[in-house]
Every structure is written in structure tokens, then in C-alpha cells.
Image: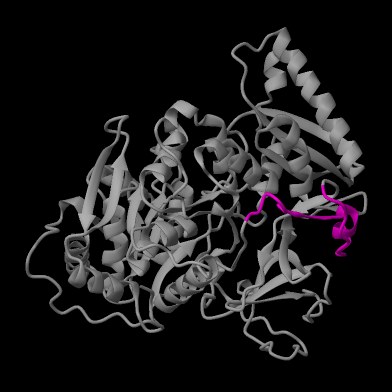
Amino acid sequence: MTTTSESTILSMLHGRASLRPDEIAFTFTHYDRDPAGVAESLTWSQLARRTMNVAVQLRRHGSAGDRAVILAPQGLEYILAFLGSLQAGLVAVPLPLPFPGSGHERVGAVLTDTEPAVVLTTSAAAVDVGDYVAKADLASPPQLVEIDGLDLDADQVGAGLEPVGAQSLAYLQYSSGSTRQPTGVMLSHRNLTVNFEQLMRSFFAAAPLPPDATLVSWLPFYHDMGLVLGVCAPILCGRRAQLMSPVAFLEKPSRWVRALAENPHAWSSAPNFAFDMAARKTADADLAGLDLGGVVGIISGAERVEPATLHRFVDRFAHFDFRDHMMRPAYGLAEATVFVATGTWDESAPAAFFDAEALAQRQVRPCRAGQGTALVRYGVPQSPAVRIVDGDSGRECAADAVGEIWVHGDNVADGYWGRPPAEQVGFGATIVDPSPGTPAGPWLRTGDLGFVHAGELFVVGRIKDLLIIRGRNHYPEDIEATVQAITGGRVAAVSVPVRGTEELVAVVELKRPADLDSAAHRRFDDVRSQVTAAISTAHGLSVGDLVLVASGSIPTTTSGKIRRAACVEQYRNNEFIRLDAEAE
């Protein structure tokens, strides 16, 4: 069951509630109350009724178009806050609930940016959230609404609520990157439904998603992939969701793998780091009596998916009947709602290899397997449309040339909330002398470099992350992959100006040893020798500084992507706590 062009997530929700009122829609398992898990579920009729009741309450405090900021723990209340905001015609603003004593700056910046009429939370978080709101010093303080304090199951609902149009603004997806000033991507109901249709066509072209499929997710609801795949997709495709919090996954990654095995035809998604973590920290005993043979697919989403990561995951769980085609690398970004292109992992032809030196010069030169840079293959989508463009000239690149990835389609957002034209440069781009069948505009400039080779799309990396050292270009992902092959942990490769020239700095996470003694010191020296030699051999670079830090020290986005700009800032301010310095 798919959407139509004028459907909204709300019309789909109420349709499901009418046709299948007593079937389970969402199950959220809490692990903070009991390590074994406490499950809480909502049927389609309960979800629809509670969404309407939340909406009625919200309209007492705001009008259509007003913003509703969500600052709540991960759980069913968060989902009701989001859907209730949409139902009321308010613009939802999903945000992470900061840890007490932290996060005031980012929350305050978004509150100031959006000037919300209401802030939605839960009774457990209300005191802290009230503190965040008070510190924002807004001209018109928003109403604080505790979702779990409302009469969610009232019988008379929906009076006076106007239908929500497909073209209306649905929510603002705020960036989770390293910039200090958050930017909110403006996404309409139509952006969401169109992108979901595109996603379904791409992922399930060969075989439809089974009717009894389960969407399994631990991703945060405030992140684009977590919101669309964990909250919106179950409603839009009419399948049950089995959810948990990011903390539950991080505490015990096997919970996610078990959920994939225990639920019929599981479909899930995760960022790059989660596959390595799950492979490392899931024991065979965690899956006793279970198998993964029924998994429909797991989306691996990143600007650049690392082939080695996918291989390790497939290899680790192969004897539990996990097969390579279940891995579905995907490319996307919030400005395109979430999804742009996907591929299917194949262990017999897992990646394509290209000369790293040529790629750095924006040229494409295939090389033998096992040499050069390994890149994941994606199909070139028809919808949305994708072109490789020279960002300087605005002209399409020739085949086998590296350029910026541009995207066109009804899934592309209208722009950033409240930003002046000078800060909307990624939107509304125009191609000069477009090729036949290519619209002149409007195009979204993604900021990602890529190319098309032999009819397949390849993503190379972020333009802003490109390292220029001694006049040569290097992609940080290449250097990070070289180091990860030795250390196994997260790595950030950045360039830092030193005495007028750019130096390579590699920040390397290692598991903190029990004792920072002489044996630990020898281990650190060994890592230094191996890493510097490998970088010199593979990339012809000398390492200006190798910073060894404990696991979890490298700043990341909410989806686990490395915040390289923040790494540079922390390095220049001498804020990294070095393991080797502690060992001395």
C-alpha cells in the first residue's frame, strides 16, 4: 500500500485506523526501566485518536503555521508530539533532549530561530525543558505542553481542525553538523510523501515489501533518517514499527540485532559506525536460537559508505543466515528530505576501485580490485533526477569526471527557515545548457562530490572536507579507511595550518587500556609506527600529528558522522585528551 501524490501522512494514518483499527502500529521497548525491556504499544486507532487529541490541545496555544518545538525523550510521546503538531497545522521542530547541564546553546539557538508557540515535552523532562526555554529569553515565551499529561483518549476529537494540505509546511529538520548556527530545512507534506514513494520504488523494485514486514529502528527521531524511517515510513507503508532508543542500542548493540531476528521481515537502517559496533559487540550467545534469514534489508546511510564496514557486518553474521543482498547502501541528505539513491551490496563484486591520485584531481581512473580507493556502487535514480555538475561553471560534467552531485525533484525542500537569499545558495541552482531530458532547474547543490561510471553513481566525499596538503588534494575518508584497517576504531583526518602550511592531523580512537602503564605506552608507540607508515605508503603523506584518544572522544553528528570542522577547532584549542600523554 503506497501513497498518492496528494496524500499526506495524516490522511494515511486515519485511513489505516479506519481499515485496521486494532492492529499494532508502533511498539517502543524501554530498557531504562528493565534491562530485559518493557514494551509499550499503540494500535492504529489509538494512534489516530491520540494524534487528534494532541492537535486539539495544541490549537489552544497556536495557529496554523506556528512552530511546535519537540524536546522530549525518545518514546511514543515523541511520536504523538510530532503527529499532533502536524495535525494541528503547526510546523513541527523535532530536537534532541539535551543532557541536564548541557546543550543550552544549540537549543536556545533553535528556539530563537523558530520563535515557537508551544514546546512539547513529557512530565519527566518538563523541569529541564522549562529551564532551556527560560534561558532562551524569547520575546513571547512559548506554552510548555506535557504530552503525557493530556487526556489522550478523549472520545470527542477533531472539532474545528482544518484538513492539512499536501503543499503546506510540515516540519523543520535542523542540522546536526558542526556549525554553531543550526539551520532548519523546510519540508512540506508533499516533500515527505514524494520522497517516500521514491524510496519504495528504489528499494523494492524487484520484490515488494511483505505485508507483515516490521520496521526496526533505534535511530533518534530528531534525525532525518530516524524520523522518516522510524516514525513516518510505518504510517506511509502501513507496516508495524519496533522501536528503541539510541541509548538502548549504544548500551547493548545486540538488542538491535536481536530485534532484526525476532521480528518478521525486518527492514531497518543505521549509520556507518553502527554496523562495526554491532559486529564487534554482539556475541553468538546473544542470538541463540535465532537467525537473520528473514531480514528484508538494512539501509546503510552516509555521504560515503565504507565497503569494509559492510563486509565486516555481512561476514560476522553470515552463519546466522545474513546475506549480502540484505545490505542496502544509500545516499541522501536532509535537503532532499532524506533519500536520493541506493544500491545492493554484493560480496562477489563488493565495490569498484579507482586510482586515488586521479580522484583527487577530479578524474576517474579504474584500477585493479584491492588497489586505490574502494567506492560503493549506487544505481542512478530516475526520480529524483541526479546530475554531476561542475560547480564553478554550472555545466554538466563529462562522463568519468568528478563533480558536484546535483538533485532535482519534488522531494527537494524549499530552502532553510528564515535564512536570507545569500544563505540559500544550495537551493534553486540552474544548469547551463542542460543536456536533452535534463531540466534547467531548480537543482539542489548537495555539496558532495561524485561521478557516474559505467552507468553507476559513486559518491566520493564532501567538498568542504577535502584536504589540500602541500598543493595536493586528498579525501579524508581514504586516509581514515587506511588507519581504521589498523586500529578498528573511529578516525578523523583533518588538515591544520602550521607555520603557513597545511599539516595532516589524524585523531585516532583506541580502547582505553585498564592500566596506562609501560605496556600501554608500547602499544601506543606500535600504533604510531604502523599508522604513520601506512599513511606514507598508501597516500604519500607524512603525518604532522597523530592524536591518540579514548573511544568516544571524536565529535560526531547525531547520526555518527565525524564533525571534522569541530575536530580542527578542538585540536587547535588543545582540547583532546591524549592517551599517550596520560600514560607518561
Above or below, comparing residue 549 to residue 299 in the picture: above
> Percent x, y for residue 449?
74, 64
Residue at point 49% right, 72% down?
Answer: 195
Q: Is residue 363 magenta?
A: yes
Residue at point 22% right, 66% down?
Answer: 58
> Percent x, y for residue 292?
46, 43
Hey, which quadrant is residue 388 in on the image? bottom right
Quarter of the image where the N terminus is located: bottom left
Above or below, comparing residue 540 to residue 378 in the picture: above
**Residue 338 appears in the figure:** yes
Residue at point 36% right, 69% down?
Answer: 236
> Percent x, y for residue 212?
33, 58
204 lies left or right of 127? right
> Percent x, y for residue 19?
20, 71
Q: Count the labels in the image.
A: 0
Quarter of the image where the C terminus is located: top right
Range covered by the magenta-colored residues: 345-369
Outermost residue toward the left? Answer: 155
